[in-house]
Amino acid sequence: MSKKQFARVVAILYLAALLAAAGLCGVRAKARKTCTEQTLTAADAQWSSIRDNHPVAWAGYDAESLVTTDTDGYLVWNIDGPVSGLRMQVRSSQPIRDPALYYTTAEGQDYQSGKTFALVESIPEQGVYVFALPGATKVHQLRLDPTSSAGAFFELEEVTLNPAGLKNGLQTSEWLFVLVAPLLAALALQEVISLFRKEKDWKELE
């Protein structure tokens, strides 16, 4: 394969990769259109390792505020619908540590580390944390771990399901694939052609 032919193959493969990426973004955007923005409240959730109506108020957090009793406090909502992401704004007496969002797709499933939303935006000074999927998926239950701090008084000022403004772009790993895969494929093709030519030359010498 000449240098000119190699360059053409690389260009064709990059064009194909970019078209595939654009198509994937379009599919994800279409999936997100099925998601409806709504507000979730703590009162509608099931809690674990979280208390309310505690006997004391502390530093501006009244007896109606929530408090984590250990490092694994979380809230669970039944969704049973398409979800693309969630925006949380929280005020806490302690620094927010390791916020996370998990989901299940069917009743009886455990919360697995593989079924998580990526934390795509965080503004700690405002208590804002945004979680998102590349597209959207049907969710049975949603589990929000607002913080891993134990004994933290906190108030969920906002929990918005499927917030507007989530980006439909590719993830970093997907962009790396688009940028690297075509070149590697072209190099592999060049090597295969070279091997065939060598084999042909050997047969002609026999």
Image (cartoon, rainbow, N blue to C red):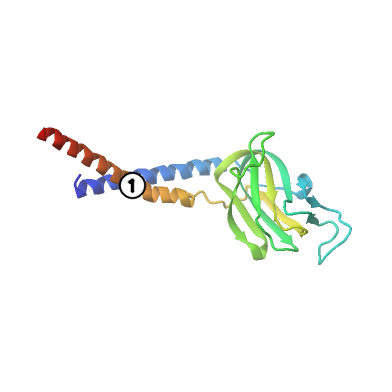
Q: Which residue is mark 1?
A: 184
Q: Tag 1: Cα neighbours inside 10 Å, few (<14), some, or many (≥20)?
A: some
45 relative to 126, above or below: above
Task: Write down the quadrant of residue 80 in the picture.
Answer: top right
Secondary element at tag 1: helix
Residue 3 is left or right of residue 108, and the answer is left
Q: Which residue reaches farthest right?
A: 55
The residue closer to the viewer here, 98 or 5, is: 98
Count of number-bearing discs: 1
Q: Which residue sits at x=46%, y=50%?
A: 173
Q: Is residue 48 visible?
A: yes
The residue closer to the viewer here, 65 or 96, is: 96
Q: Which residue sits at x=83%, y=53%?
A: 52
Task: Write down the quadrant of residue 79 in the picture.
Answer: top right
Quarter placement of the N terminus: top left
Q: Is residue 14 visible?
A: no
Residue 19 is left or right of residue 91, and the answer is left
Q: Which residue sits at x=77%, y=47%?
A: 48
The spot of residue 177 in percent (x, y) is 41, 48
The spot of residue 130 in percent (x, y) is 62, 54
The spot of residue 19 in percent (x, y) is 39, 44
The residue closer to the viewer here, 49 or 46, is: 49
